[in-house]
Every structure is written in structure tokens, then in C-alpha cells.
Image (cartoon, grey):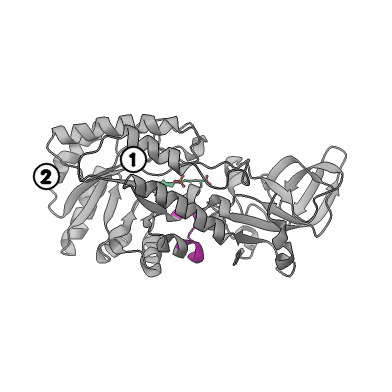
Amino acid sequence: MFNSSILSTFQDQETPFYYYDLALLQETLDVCKQAADRYNFHVHYAMKANFNQKVVEKIKDAGFGADCVSGNEVKQAIEIGFAKDKVVFAGVGKSDREINEALENDIFCFNVESVQELGVINELAAAAGKNAGIALRINPNVDAHTHHNITTGLEENKFGINHWELHDCVEALKELPNITLIGIHFHIGSQITNLSVFKSLCVKVNEIHRWFEERGHSIKILNVGGGLGIDYHQPDEKPVADFEEYFRIFDQFLERKAGQEVHFELGRALVAHSGTLISRVLYVKNGIKKHFLVLDAGMTELMRPALYQAYHKIENISRVEGDVVKYDIVGPICESTDCFGKEVEMPQSFRGDMIAIRSAGAYGEVMASKYNLRDQVKSVYSK
Ligand code: LLP
């Protein structure tokens, strides 16, 4: 159950809003950092998961780097104070303006997704009188066994360079003096809960790494991406992801040479459980076939259920007791997919009750939209 002792502090707040438990965020960061440090692994935070300023500041203070996927994310990371040599810029379609801004800021590395992009970065770096560090994002064709909309490492996906294109990349690099190959990069998908998938990734990375070594390219950085999933069904029982086991798999199965660095790009596992979307019941609609709770939050504030049929635990935090009723929990938006959960059991609920939609700290607030000209969703923080 969501910590309802803070309910009194919410009473005067206008809903909906995101509530961030900064103590839980800190604990999660500490556990992750300690586990990564044990193996001398480096973690860049995937800012796309949540770029809320307070959240990102905490992550920066905890010593993480930043993995950015737009020029604006690069800009924000640097403004918040991430060291430039800990900022990575990834993305399948970087514009010239974004590349130029990142070059001006002397970021650590561009994760490059095509042969064509190699040429563009080289040309822009030459014009700016710079040399850019790059990692090749390689599509390892490993199935992440997650929702098909958040799978990225298969040949049918738009991401990365396929193995049959590697030869062309290596040849192209010989003619591109303003970029330097420093790493190889992989990311196979998100919300991965079957950790054996990461073992398969290691096997593939080892194979591709050897391919480069055999051709005389020494690779300084092995970047294995992110994707560690969380338990959306048990936010209270498992508030912190199993970082220990996750890093242990890479330590055990990833072959690395002396002096070589291993980088990770974690997003969801660092921030998801510390965010909760708090909303109020506007109307209770009792039908013959269905009972609906109509909330003042909708898919405009949290899009994941509408987009991926994602599960989030939903609780009535105003009422612990009462006859249990099955409700479809819906939002006010004019779309039938504007539904947070179907047949959710909760105590009989009434207009004005506060509803918590749990584990919404990742890909929640940042994916909010203005559809229906809705207000920008607000944020409230624990002490
Ligand atoms: N690295 C790359 C190259 C990525 O594309 C992503 C996420 C990450 C790292 C971070 O992955 P994480 O550790 O958060 O799984 N909006 C979707 C998730 C999209 C993930 C996009 N890429 C959702 O709400 O489930």
C-alpha cells in the first residue's frame, strides 16, 4: 500500500500531480552505485526516462553520467552539472544542429547508428576543428523477451548497425580523420525481467568484440545499454531493482581486457518506483456491466497503459476498508484507450477519493502530452 501517512500533506494539493519519493530514489541510486562500483562498472542515467530537474540533480549528485537522446537533453545535462566527459549522445536521427551543439560542448561520446551518420559527424567535427569520440551502436539481434513496442535489438528494428554493415563502417573510419572509435554499444530493449537475456547479450558482445580485435581495433569501451526491468506488480515488496544480480551477470559473462571500461545506460530501474501519479475520483459511474471510476488524470499524464497496455498498480489511498468493487479506472480524455486498468479491485470508492497510480517515475511525466489542451502536470516532492 502506498504510504498513506503523507495523505494529509496532499489534501490541499490540486490533482493530478506526480509525487516523487526522494528518499526511495536516493536508496535506489545508492544500491545501484555500490553494486556497479564493486565491478568498476560505469552507469550513465538514461535521461529519457525522467528529466524532472530535481530527480536528475539527485542522480548527478550520486555520481552517475548522463545518456542523452536529443540536443535538449545534452543541454539540460550540462546545465544541471554533469561533467562533460560523462555525457553521451545517442539516437537514430541526430540533426546537424544537435551534433554541432554536442561538439561545441566537447561531450564524451556519440553513439552512432549508421555509416551515413559517421560521415556527417566527421564533416561537422572537421568544420568545427574538433575530433569526436564515437561508439558504434550495433544491433546484436538478441530477443529481449519484452513488449514488442519496447524491443530494439532485433534485425527488424530501426536501431543500430547490423553485423553485415560492420565491415563498411570499419573501412569508412579509415577515411574519417575527425572521429575516433572508442567503443561499441548495444541496447536490446526495455523492461527486461528475464535476466538470462543479458547473458545472451554478453555472448553476442564477446563475439562482436573479438571481430574488432581481430581487425586490429582496440576497443576502450563496451557499452551494454540499459533495460533492467522493475516489478510493477510489487512496488512495496520490491521497491529497488535487483542491481546486484544484474551486474553480476555482466561481470561473469562479459569478456573484458585490462583497462577496458564497461558502461551501462539505465533509466527505468533507477527512477520508476519513486514516482507515483496522484489523482482524484471525479465521478463514479455505475453501469450494469461495468463500474467506472473517472479520474482527473488521464493518458495525457501517464500514457504507458494506453500505449503499451502497461500495468500499473492502482490504489485508493483515501479508503483502506469497505466492500470490494471491481472498477475500470479511466481518465477524462476523449479516447477509449484512456484507461489505466480494467476490473481493478478496490474498496467502494467515492467522488473526491485520492487514487495512487504506482511506479510511474519512469516514462511517466516525461511522456505527458497537451492533447485536449490539458494543463502541464505538476510535481510534488517528499522532504
Ligand atoms: N539506452 C538506449 C539506447 C535506449 O533506447 C533506452 C531506452 C535506454 C538506454 C534506457 O532503457 P531502460 O533502462 O529505461 O529500460 N517508453 C517506454 C520505454 C522506452 C525505452 C526507450 N529506450 C516505456 O514506457 O516502457
The percent coordinates of residue 317 (x first, y second) are 75, 54
Disc 1: which residue: 186
Q: Residue at x 41, y 52 (%)?
A: 33
Q: Is residue 54 magenta?
A: yes
Which three-letter amino acid code belongs to the residue tagged 1?
Phe
Q: Is residue 350 magenta?
A: no
Disc 2: which residue: 174
Instruction: Using the numbered discs, state the Cα–Cα distance from disc 1 to disc 2 in whole angstroms.
Output: 22 Å
Which three-letter amino acid code belongs to the residue tagged 2?
Lys
- The quadrant the C terminus occupies is bottom right
> To which quarter of the image does residue 73 belong?
bottom left
Ligand 1 under 8 Å from disc 2 Cβ: no
Q: Nearer the viewer, mark 1 or mark 2?
A: 1
Residue in front for this viewpoint, 194 or 154: 194
Left or right of residue 237, residue 288 in this image: right
Magenta residue span? 48-56
Give the mark nearest the N terminus, 1 or 2. 2
